[in-house]
Amino acid sequence: MSENVYIIGAGIHPFGRTDGRSGREQGVHAVREALADAGLEWPDIECAYGGSAAAGNADIMVNELGLTSLPFTNVANGCATGGSALAASQQAIASGMYDLALAVGFDKHPRGAFNAKPADYGLPEWYGQTGMMLTTQFFALKIQRYMQLHGISRTTLGRVAEKAFRNGTLTPHAWRRSPVDLETILNAPMINDPLTKYMFCSPAEGAVALILASEKKMKELGADGVKIRAVSVKTRPPNSFEVFQAGISIEEGGKPTVLASKAAFEKAGVGPEDISVAQLQDTESGAEIMHMAENGFCKDGDQEEWLANGWSEIGGRLPVNTDGGCLACGEPVGASGLRQIYENVTQLRQRGGERQVPGKPRFGYSHVYGAPGLSGVAILERE
């Protein structure tokens, strides 16, 4: 595959709760916004990839968008559904088969925690009876272990959430638009030790759509493109410690995020030091902390210094989750990974408004993590 691929259109439906509008309708809204951004009409799109976890098949969107007979493939890959849709769209164009593609994700989850069933992940019922199917409990145990190994404090967990809510106040598409101070976050009701209620994201609603184009088509259209330098999706290797896996090894093995990150950096020909802005999976505060290291942006334990010094703030050394991430936006599973890409496209185009990263950011990095232990990484470039 040798064709360069660009994102030339980006659309979003605000995240949160939208009574009276289905998840699919939110997806249609995002697609129309992306088409308008790219200066295109629906019949121009040659292929589409999209998905949701709880709001129906994405291909049914053609009922509202138009019956153009394009190939529309449904994608399902947990929290990495959006990232996988992007990867499929990118590959479709890079192969030379198409010049214009759509990647779309949407969801509309009921209130309350995600309630995954063991059988859906090839696990016995007893695994669910241990409580490990409850993601709040699993990730609390995982960050507990990480904190003990690497000297991470609860204050640092709180600072991640405080930053997220502060960034959310600057983001029109965010769900949580009010700041929450550190003391309130730390003293809030404990959900699963050490994580309080403000340290978790919530299942939500929302949608994101991206229009991808070949370099030839982008130039032909005179479009405002952001180049996709690399996309990588990896599942868990042996001896990893990931959500919804059947056993835990006493040996410490590889991590899917580390593998996906290294592969993406290798494909892109850049390193962590080149990244201008990053969006990292932060379904809870501990996830952002662990993923900072797993994606190569710091060493294990250095997050204490990073958060204390504000290095991951919008004006810091490496701005992380500039739109508030999952903590401020919530997580509609099908849309969450594409929201990260949408935010990086916005930042690289310098359209971020009050949350705009200073200077002229060149490289945007996004990382999404999902069950059962898989990660997707995309690196974008503003040429």
Image: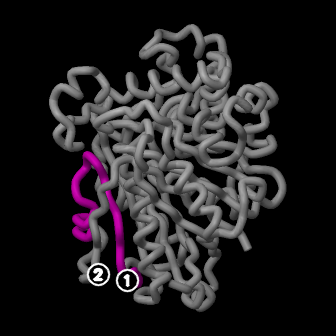
Return the residue nearer the eye: 319 or 143: 143
Q: Is mark 1 on a helix, strand or loop?
A: loop
Return the residue nearer the eye: 237 or 312: 237
Q: In which quarter of the image is residue 314?
A: top right
Q: Residue drawn at (71%, 38%), measured in percent from left and top?
A: 299
Q: Is residue 352 above or below residue 217?
A: above
- Residue designated by label 2: 70
Instruction: Verify CB contact (< 8 Å) between mark 2 and mark 1.
Output: yes
The spot of residue 86 in percent (x, y) is 45, 65
Instruction: Give the CA separation, mark 2 to mark 1.
Output: 6 Å
Q: What stretch is highlighted in magenta?
A: 44-63
Q: Residue drawn at (67%, 20%), measured in percent from left and top?
A: 151
- Residue designated by label 1: 46
The spot of residue 28 in percent (x, y) is 35, 61
Q: Is mark 2 on a helix, strand or loop?
A: loop
Is 47 within the magenta? yes
Is 292 within the magenta? no
